[in-house]
Image (cartoon, helix red, strand yellow):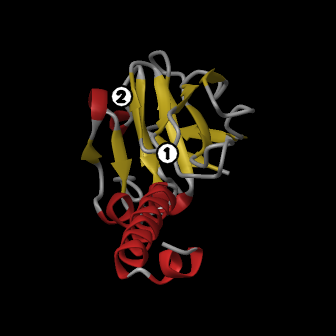
Amino acid sequence: MTEHQTTTDPRMTSRRHVLLGVGGVGATVALAACGTDTDDASETPNTPIDGGATTGGATGGTTDGDASALTTTSEVPVGGGVIFAAQGVVVTQPTEGEFKAFSNICTHQQCPVANLDGGTINCTCHFSAFSISDGSVVSGPAPAPLEEKSVTVDGENISVA
């Protein structure tokens, strides 16, 4: 068989197309895994997720009449927190009465964090974990801590700037 016949052999072309198609599908799946679909989190107000943590809805939690407040102290579990996807913030309560807030965007590839569990804020895009106490990296590949936000507690109401 000559080289010319090999390149025009329908069996070889078919095999080549199949292999290229499989490679294309694999690349598409890999890229889709790096996407940032936050619609579910922002439309489901205060839905419990891992370890009693919650994801806040588009307008935050109950604020007992204070329109500037994001949530209330009773909605943030001790040793956990709440993700407010629409506001781009995570509010945590590392110890009783201590409230912290951080950006909800992972410092690795800017995916939104997905949950809180076991004292960490977790990004499931590439499995980085951050401390609920100070936003520091507990496990990578994130290169830097989450950006800390200013928290104001007024009675039961929590505001984040």
Amino acid carrying label 2: it is Pro
Q: In the image shown, does 50 or 19 lie closer to the viewer?
A: 19
Determine whether, in the image, residue 122 is placed left or right of residue 103.
left
Determine whether, in the image, residue 136 is placed left or right of residue 40.
right
Q: Report, in whole angstroms, how far the alpha carbon at label 1 lies from the one at label 2.
A: 24 Å
Q: Position of residue 92 (x, y in %)?
A: 49, 32
Quadrant in the rendering for residue 22: bottom left
Q: Name the residue rendered at 43%, 59% in the picture.
A: 26
Q: Position of residue 144 (x, y in %)?
A: 74, 32
Label 1's element?
A: loop
Q: Position of residue 114 (x, y in %)?
A: 43, 44
Q: Position of residue 12 (x, y in %)?
A: 41, 72
Q: Is residue 65 above or below residue 150?
A: below
Q: In the image shown, does 138 or 5 lie closer to the viewer?
A: 5
Q: Which mark is residue 77?
A: 2
Q: Name the residue rendered at 41%, 32% in the picture.
A: 116
Amino acid carrying label 1: it is Cys
Q: Earlier in the sequence, mark 1 or mark 2?
A: 2
Q: Which mark is residue 18?
A: none
Q: Name the residue rendered at 70%, 31% in the picture.
A: 145
Q: Is residue 140 above or below residue 3?
A: above
Residue annotated with mark 1: 125
Q: Is residue 99 above or below residue 70?
A: above
The crowding category of the residue bearing disc 1, from other C-alpha atoms within 10 Å (few below 14, some 14 to 19, many at least 20), is: some
Q: Name the residue rendered at 36%, 57% in the picture.
A: 41
Q: In the image shown, does 134 or 109 lie closer to the viewer?
A: 109
